[in-house]
Amino acid sequence: MKKKSTTRRQFIAGSAAAAATTACATSLKARPIVKAGKRADLGPDDTIRMGIIGVGGMGGGHLGSTINQNKNGEDKVHIVALSDVCKPRLDNRLNQARNDQEGVQVDGYRDYKELLARDDIHCVLIASPEHWHAQMAVDAIEAGKDVYVEKPMTLELEDAMWLRDVMAANPDMRLQVGTQYMMYGKYQEAKRVIAEGGIGHPTFSQTGYCRNSKDGEWLYGIDEKVQPGEMLDWEAWCGPVGEAKWDTEVYHRWRRYSKWSTGIIGDLLVHMMTPMMFALDRGWPTRVTSSGGHYLDKEMDNHDQVNLTVEFEKEHTMIVAGSTCNENGLEVLIRGHEADIFLGSNNCVVRPQRIFVDDVDEQTIQCANVSPQEALRLDWLRCVRTREQNQSQVDLACKVMVVVVLATRSAWGGKAWTFDPETMTASPA
């Protein structure tokens, strides 16, 4: 088993290196930049009609929470359509949606394109595995539906750039990326303080997402009834990645496998890196180094410990720690030449460097408590209704995806990777 695992990891590292020899822009030439279709009419007091694509754990969570937000009067929204390639999962969520939304007709589809073909749906929430995110989001935009797409925004960097170009060509559409920590007020305040010169030049920051488990990470339950055929369209699940041999472990626990997920980096670290990069506003990442290890969870293909160093256009370095085998992470902190910003609590705390105590006042900026995922979804629904801009947008998500993909390649291949913002290409250093 050890020999097989080592061979697989060497293969992945070699594949990543080969992929980088092709520029992102070159790959994009074959990608269609679609034009958004007509949006369904939505008056100021109308109920938003929403669909969900992918109704597993995360999609099911959004389903229940959205229904509750409607019941609580936080927004007028009905979930009218669900789609999933897994029949038992779809049937279960259909029962939930119908029982919990009195008087609302909810239809189910095994093929998400049938859901998108409806002209009475205003928006869709995409909670499929990440290898499907880009294609489903582009198809939804082409169908005239606003999109909430779960994180990470895509699996591949080329897909992220494609989605960015599609949104640039359709500025009237709205796409929210599901990095909910963007709704914490402390990052908004940190951005303001930095922009006003309150800490001098921001030189160095640190963040991370670390947690622990006794048995291993992403060990979701396996439903033995789910097999290719009537119960599951396995070919459709594989989708853009291509044909793959059936493996119940991969289907139920895909985040553990590097072919289907970037693991800690894409699933966990994006939560912390996205609002930090928003607050810093240091431009595109230009150089990423990463190391990864298999220290406890030897059965998992993806790493259970990663450490990243990210350099940016505007002279800043960020270090990021990720773990699924120890819960003590790095203090969330932005260091400036004149002062530091501490973001480990709900508030934004500014403290001067010793030599600048006479120039910079220490301050604690109080921020409201929020439920970030609930707030992010409401922000999206508000923008679906008003056409204002939403909080977690595609341009920032693309910068985050540069870090995610380059860090993944670096961790597997043992080399630093660089990104050129002028040519939008990545290459090994």
Image (tube, rainbow, N blue to C red):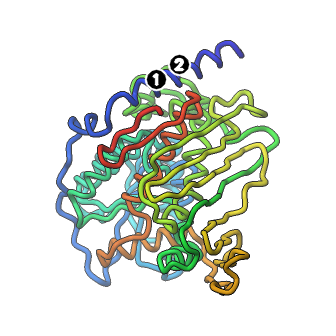
Contact, CB < 8 Å: mark 1 with mark 2?
yes
Residue drawn where x is 33% and y is 71% of the image: 384
Indicate which disc residue 49 carries: none
In the image, residue 62 above or below residue 295: below
Residue 72 visible from this viewpoint: yes
Label 2 environment density (alpha carbons within 10 Å; few <14, some 14–19, many ≥20): some
Q: Which amino acid does label 1 sit on?
A: Ser
Toward the right, the furthest residue is 214
Measuring from the top left, give residue 352's x and y in whole percent: 68, 78
Q: Which of 335 and 111 is in front in this view?
A: 335
Mark 1 to mark 2 CA distance (whole Å): 6 Å
Horizontal side of residue 37 vs 192, given as left or right: left
Residue corresponding to mark 1? 15
In the image, residue 372 above or below residue 252: below
Indicate which disc residue 11 carries: 2
Q: What residue type is labelled 2?
A: Phe
Quadrant assignment for the N terminus? top right
